[in-house]
Image: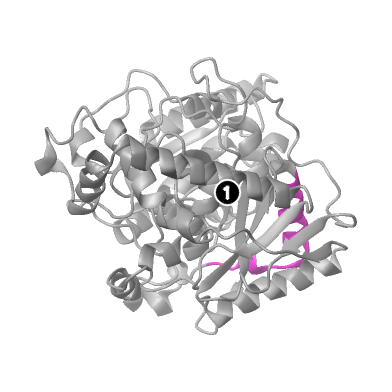
């Protein structure tokens, strides 16, 4: 197999090939490193690569396997990590020049669990400043492999780019207001935002502690399920990590979704939504119906004010997270993040309490709705993958942030798990995504529904044109 053929395998397949001895961990890792070396200067997905460590880990994985020892489902599989997860002995900057030289002495819990499962670390992925909505001015912004002028999504931009471009078999992202879902949608990959607390946040730079979720970004729902099975579970270093046992996320029948009730609010998914996006969600509805699911008409609770208040909520918690360096080192901060922190420092305890009450009310309303259906189907974004120029233009429009995050911020506020997945291309070949929402701790049903959908569709198999010489002028 060529380097590119290896690199385009899904995580589940490459894991199986390593286990059966068809491919070695070293062979797979070398293929990935050569591909990164070729495409990183164009795509800028990585903040830093770790080739020596990756080859050492791959060699160790092959030696263990030769001795009959397999560490876990990711044994020998190369992955990459968003650069806000601590990595012992490797700089972790969180997209901030302020932390450019910060070298943790310990791993984040999610990194430890990946290592313990036998994963090979290719490097740390680029991201926006402190996981907010803009890259620091000193950072080279990752490039969308579908279109050099395309938006990558924020804040897990490098994770979306690397996963979509075949520069890793799976990656870690985080989601505070949509940061797994935006890059998954914009880059045409599958992203799983778990229930808040399902995955430990120990050793992960905070943006807003009660909103931050850590989860996998992969090319298939099955791959996400495998990674989540490694990441999830209680953690003695994080008292907010949930104690619930971790199930087998790949169990369950994917040939039929009979008995699964999927709620859909026709007005909610079409109001102020691009027609191509609404059409893709309706098309996904048809696929789920053919798989046996029952589509139930629902009315989504009104979250307009909640979405409006996501920014001040995030600002207050972010100001706490950055108290040691802001405003003391303000000159090192980019304008977007500095503005958020200034807002957080201006707001009062009364402001925060009003938001918390509103958040609790909406969470209760969504829990009530989720008692009537098993899943909710909706867009991940109101528009298909936009260009960077269009995003810059939209930023100038009143209500931009509210429009962008109307399908994402509410479930960060409520902590419900979501699955974002490719739902078809647009007429201009831009990725377009749909999103499923489940009840707390029901990630297993999300993965099952996503696997079923991807077993009868092939949008997730589409590959960006980055390997085609005919499109080199676009990059």
Position in image of residue 12 (x %, y %) = 67, 45
Residue 120 sits above or below residue 280 on the image: above
Position in image of residue 244 (x %, y %) = 69, 25
Residue 299 sits above or below residue 241 on the image: below
In magenta, the rendered stretch is 445-463
Q: Is the image coloured rainbow, by chain, by secondary structure, or in one colour?
A: one colour
Q: How would you rate the neighbour count of disc 1 (Cα within 10 Å): few for under 14, some for 14-19, many for 20 or more?
A: many
Position in image of residue 448 (x %, y %) = 76, 49
Left or right for 47, reference 28: left
Most frequent secondary structure within the magenta stretch: helix
Task: Please tell me how many numbered marks the rendered image carries.
Answer: 1
The residue that appears at 23% across and 53% down in the rendered structure is 336
Residue identified by numbered label 1: 362
Q: Is residue 454 magenta?
A: yes
- Of the 4 image quadrants, the one containing the N terminus is bottom right
Q: Is residue 170 visible?
A: no
Left or right for 86, reference 459: left
Residue 458 sits above or below residue 96 on the image: below
Place residue 90 in its image quadrant. Answer: top left
The one of 14 and 395 positioned closer to us in this rendering: 395
Left or right for 172, reference 348: right
């Amino acid at each position: 197999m060529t380097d590119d053929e290896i690199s385009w395998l899904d995580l589940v397949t490459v894991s199986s090939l390593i286990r059966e001895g068809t491919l070695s961990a070293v062979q797979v890792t070398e293929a990935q490193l050569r591909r990164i070396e070729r495409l990183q200067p164009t795509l800028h997905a990585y903040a830093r690569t770790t080739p020596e460590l990756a080859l050492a880990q791959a060699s160790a994985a092959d030696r263990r396997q030769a001795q009959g020892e397999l560490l876990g489902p990711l044994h020998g599989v190369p992955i990459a990590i968003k650069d806000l997860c601590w990595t012992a002995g490797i700089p972790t900057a969180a997209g901030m020049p302020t932390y450019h030289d910060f070298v943790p002495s310990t791993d984040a819990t999610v990194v430890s669990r990946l290592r313990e499962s036998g994963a090979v670390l290719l490097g740390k992925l680029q991201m926006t400043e402190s996981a907010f909505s803009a890259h620091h001015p000193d950072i080279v912004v990752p490039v969308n492999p579908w279109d050099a002028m395309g938006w990558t999504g924020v804040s897990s931009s490098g994770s979306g780019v690397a996963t979509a471009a075949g520069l890793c078999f799976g990656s870690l992202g985080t989601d505070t207001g949509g940061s797994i879902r935006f890059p998954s949608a914009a880059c045409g990959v599958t992203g799983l935002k778990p229930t808040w607390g399902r995955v430990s946040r120990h050793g992960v730079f905070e943006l807003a502690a009660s909103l931050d979720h850590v989860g996998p970004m992969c090319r298939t729902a099955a791959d996400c399920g495998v990674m989540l099975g490694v990441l999830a579970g209680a953690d003695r270093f994080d008292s907010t990590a949930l104690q619930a046992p971790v199930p087998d996320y790949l169990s369950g029948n994917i040939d039929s979704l009979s008995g699964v009730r999927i709620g859909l609010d026709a007005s909610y998914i079409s109001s102020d939504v691009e027609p191509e996006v609404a059409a893709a969600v309706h098309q996904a509805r048809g696929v789920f119906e053919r798989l046996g699911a029952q589509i139930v008409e629902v009315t989504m609770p009104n979250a307009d004010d909640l979405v409006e208040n996501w920014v001040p909520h995030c600002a207050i918690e972010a100001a706490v997270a950055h108290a040691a360096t802001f405003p003391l080192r303000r000159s090192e901060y980019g304008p977007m993040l500095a503005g958020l922190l200034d807002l957080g420092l201006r707001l009062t305890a009364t402001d925060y309490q009003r938001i918390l009450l509103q958040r609790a009310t909406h969470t209760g309303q969504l829990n009530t709705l989720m008692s009537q259906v098993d899943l909710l189907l909706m867009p991940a974004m109101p528009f298909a993958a936009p260009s960077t120029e269009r995003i810059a233009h939209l930023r100038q429009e009143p209500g931009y942030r509210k429009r962008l995050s109307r399908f994402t911020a509410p479930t960060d506020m409520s902590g419900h798990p979501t699955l974002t997945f490719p739902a078809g291309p647009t007429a201009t070949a831009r990725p377009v995504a749909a999103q499923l929402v489940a009840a707390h701790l029901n990630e297993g049903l999300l993965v099952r529904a996503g696997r079923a959908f991807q077993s009868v569709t092939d949008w997730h198999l589409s590959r960006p044109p980055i390997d085609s010489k005919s499109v080199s002028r676009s990059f």
